[in-house]
């Protein structure tokens, strides 16, 4: 699309043509079958690129170019079932596809018209095979706004985005006074999806009210929470939608430049973002005097080096400016004095991805979704001890029970649900008593957790909550920038105490000191990293006090996770004397006793606790369930 689009009439005409082509593609009115292959990072790691290449090769070899097309799309979300291949116009979804299945898809489905039954999703409850994506429980309660276009459009082809609603919101914004655009965002009730939940429209208003020749819009794509991949998937699946949101923000506050700050660990997202920017520049949708309206805007990309603290907006500004990524004291806030001292607004990827919908569909429609104080939808990276791992976008107000058991499919292997950690390292653990809690910003905070950027890690009965708190504190301790003493020293000291407890050396006095340190770190740290660092500790101590007491009083880990307080044990009555465990043991810690086993001429085995390195090789290798942790 190298031809310059000079005005809104030309753009509207182009959008209409792209939309007609896209609708024809989905409905099969273009005379072709269309094969869509997931090219999100998760599926790419399972050879989806090779699957696409093989499909395209077979289409050429079998002279099907006039009848079939195969293209990449963004993330389908249901990561534990990928790689995905979807076929239109039938809207048929195949899951768990392998490279060898490409031939079957072409020969049996495309040419033979036969559904490949073993590649269909099987509902675990009904055992029925499901052909269409929307009929799978994982998708039924989802509503894609931020994930608009992901899994449907080719993220590297601008016309596909234009065929699926791109720039309709921008056109409306450019024909509306800037203050009214901000009013529309205010009326929508959208709050920042990056963690704190600050009203987006208010942030825009602050920047709009500043008098300055230069202002900036910054997209925070520095997604650092363990297990989080919301922003990455949005940028990989529909980068144009995020760019459009940034342009609307730029128009609203009077900015001419936008900066994408994206983790360098997201090379696919960065590459697709670069492609989208280049294509938009080539056709005049980025640059000077866009569509003849007098509005000029350019996008720039800056790569983050992976520092978690750079997700904090003032540390992010320092990083873009080439300084060390450390938070600045506030006030002044970035909307007043931000990038290079100029008024700047910082919104995360998911927030900006929602803005085109608000302008396109209207603030009232967005505000009709969600709860009274938390409007719209939220994307979660659902992971951990849950059957359906993946990316989920749900309306605010969906309960934790619906998220975990309806969408997530419950806990694997019949285990009991124990807790869910929301908000990443800055969040807290919620338990069974919280399952009926509607998910929104205020409800989660009231229960000792937070929304955060959207990480949601599920834990079952086999998780040790003291060990979980230690894991997150290790992360926070590593990622603290060290600028302020409460965070630098407080997190280190809390980690030392948690380590002491998990090694079986803790005391009741340590628990009191842990609580005191948590409070000091929270109330005195400079930025949100330190202010929320103790949340995993305080929430687990509140919800699971008996586990902490067992560690420091009985010196036992109820979940048998903390190695210093557990041992592997062979149950004599179950041991068959097969010798597999002793052959697998890397420490020669398993010996034969003189007691006869059930197998003829075999003897019961014994594990020497002094020699055992607690690697678990014996437990995982025993075929008779004779080895346990105690």
Image: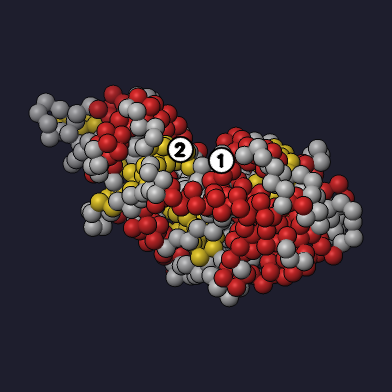
* Tag 2 residue: 71
Instruction: Describe residue 446's horizontal placement relative to residue 152 as left or right.
Output: right
Q: Nearer the viewer, residue 225 or 120?
A: 120
| Residue at x 23% of width, y 27% of height | 579
Q: Using residue 94 as the reference point, say whether residue 236 is left or right of it.
A: right
User: Is residue 568 shown to the viewer in this render?
Assistant: no
Classify 10 Å Cα crowding around label 1: few (below 14), some (14-19), many (20 and above).
some
- Asked whether residue 161 is in view, the answer is yes
Picture coordinates of residue 254, whole percent (x, y): 81, 57
Q: In terms of depth relative to the viewer, which is nearer, 294 or 600?
A: 294
Q: State if disc 2 and disc 1 touch (CB < 8 Å).
A: yes
Q: Would you place residue 82 above or below residue 549 in this image?
A: above
Residue shown at 34%/43% (left/top)?
Answer: 95
Q: Secondary structure at mark 1?
A: loop
Q: Could you tell me which secondary element the residue under label 2 belongs to? A: strand
- Residue 333 position (above or below residue 363): above
- Residue 164: x and y in percent read 53, 53
Residue extending farthest to the left is: 600
Where residue 184 sits, quadrant-wise, is bottom right
Per the image, the residue denoted by label 1 is 157
């Amino acid at each position: 699309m190298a031809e310059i689009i000079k005005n809104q009439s030309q753009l509207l005409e182009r959008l209409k043509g792209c939309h007609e082509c896209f609708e024809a593609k989905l409905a099969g009115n273009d005379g072709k079958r269309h094969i869509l292959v997931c090219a999100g990072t998760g599926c790419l790691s399972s050879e989806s690129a090779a699957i696409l290449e093989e499909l395209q090769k077979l289409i050429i070899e079998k002279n099907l170019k006039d009848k079939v097309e195969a293209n990449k799309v963004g993330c389908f979300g249901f990561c534990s079932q990928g790689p995905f291949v979807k076929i239109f116009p039938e809207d048929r979804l195949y899951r768990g596809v392998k490279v060898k299945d490409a031939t079957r898809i072409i020969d049996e489905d495309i040419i033979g018209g036969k559904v490949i039954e073993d590649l269909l999703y099987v509902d675990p409850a009904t055992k029925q095979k499901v052909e269409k994506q929307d009929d799978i429980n994982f998708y039924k309660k989802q509503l894609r706004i931020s994930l608009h276009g992901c899994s449907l459009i080719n993220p590297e082809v601008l016309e596909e985005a234009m065929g699926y609603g791109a720039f309709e919101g921008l056109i409306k914004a450019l024909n509306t006074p800037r203050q009214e655009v901000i009013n529309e965002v205010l009326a929508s009730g959208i709050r920042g999806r990056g963690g704190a939940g600050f009203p987006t429209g208010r942030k825009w208003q602050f920047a709009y009210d500043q008098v300055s020749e230069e202002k900036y819009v910054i997209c925070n794509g520095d997604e650092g929470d363990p297990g989080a991949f919301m922003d990455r998937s949005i940028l990989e699946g529909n980068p144009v939608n995020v760019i459009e949101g940034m342009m609307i923000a730029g128009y609203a506050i009077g900015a001419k430049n936008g900066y994408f700050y994206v983790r360098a660990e997201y090379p696919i997202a960065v590459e697709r973002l670069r492609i989208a920017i280049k294509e938009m520049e080539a056709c005049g949708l980025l640059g000077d005097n866009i569509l003849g309206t007098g509005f000029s805007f350019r996008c720039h990309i800056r790569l983050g080096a992976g520092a978690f603290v750079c997700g904090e907006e003032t540390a992010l500004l320092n990083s873009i400016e080439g300084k060390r990524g450390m938070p600045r004291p506030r006030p002044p806030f970035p909307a007043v004095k931000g990038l290079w001292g100029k008024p700047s607004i910082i919104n995360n990827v998911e927030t900006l991805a929602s803005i085109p919908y608000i302008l396109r569909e209207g603030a009232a429609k967005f505000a009709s979704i969600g709860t009274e104080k938390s409007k719209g939808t939220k994307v979660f990276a659902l992971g951990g001890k849950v059957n359906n791992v993946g990316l989920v976008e749900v309306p605010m107000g969906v309960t934790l029970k619906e998220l975990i058991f309806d969408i997530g499919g419950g806990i694997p292997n019949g285990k009991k649900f124990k807790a869910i950690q929301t908000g990443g390292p800055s969040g807290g653990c919620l338990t069974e008593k919280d399952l009926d809690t509607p998910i929104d910003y205020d409800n989660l905070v009231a229960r000792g957790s937070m929304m955060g950027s959207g990480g949601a890690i599920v834990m079952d009965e086999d998780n040790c909550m003291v060990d979980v708190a230690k894991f997150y504190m290790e992360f926070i301790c590593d990622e603290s920038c060290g600028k302020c003493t409460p965070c630098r020293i407080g997190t280190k000291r809390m980690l030392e105490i948690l380590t002491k407890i998990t090694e079986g050396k803790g005391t009741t006095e340590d628990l009191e000191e842990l609580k005191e340190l948590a409070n000091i770190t929270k109330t005195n740290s400079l930025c949100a990293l330190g202010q929320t660092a103790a949340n995993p500790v305080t929430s687990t101590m509140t919800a699971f006090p008996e586990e902490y007491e067992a560690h420091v009083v009985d010196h036992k880990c109820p979940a048998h996770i903390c190695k210093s307080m557990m041992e592997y044990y062979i149950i004599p009555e179950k041991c068959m004397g097969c010798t597999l465990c002793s052959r697998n043991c890397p420490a020669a810690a398993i010996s034969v006793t003189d007691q006869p086993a059930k197998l003829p001429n075999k003897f019961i085995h014994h594990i020497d606790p002094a020699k055992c390195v607690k690697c678990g090789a014996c437990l995982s290798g025993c075929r008779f369930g004779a080895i346990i942790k105690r």
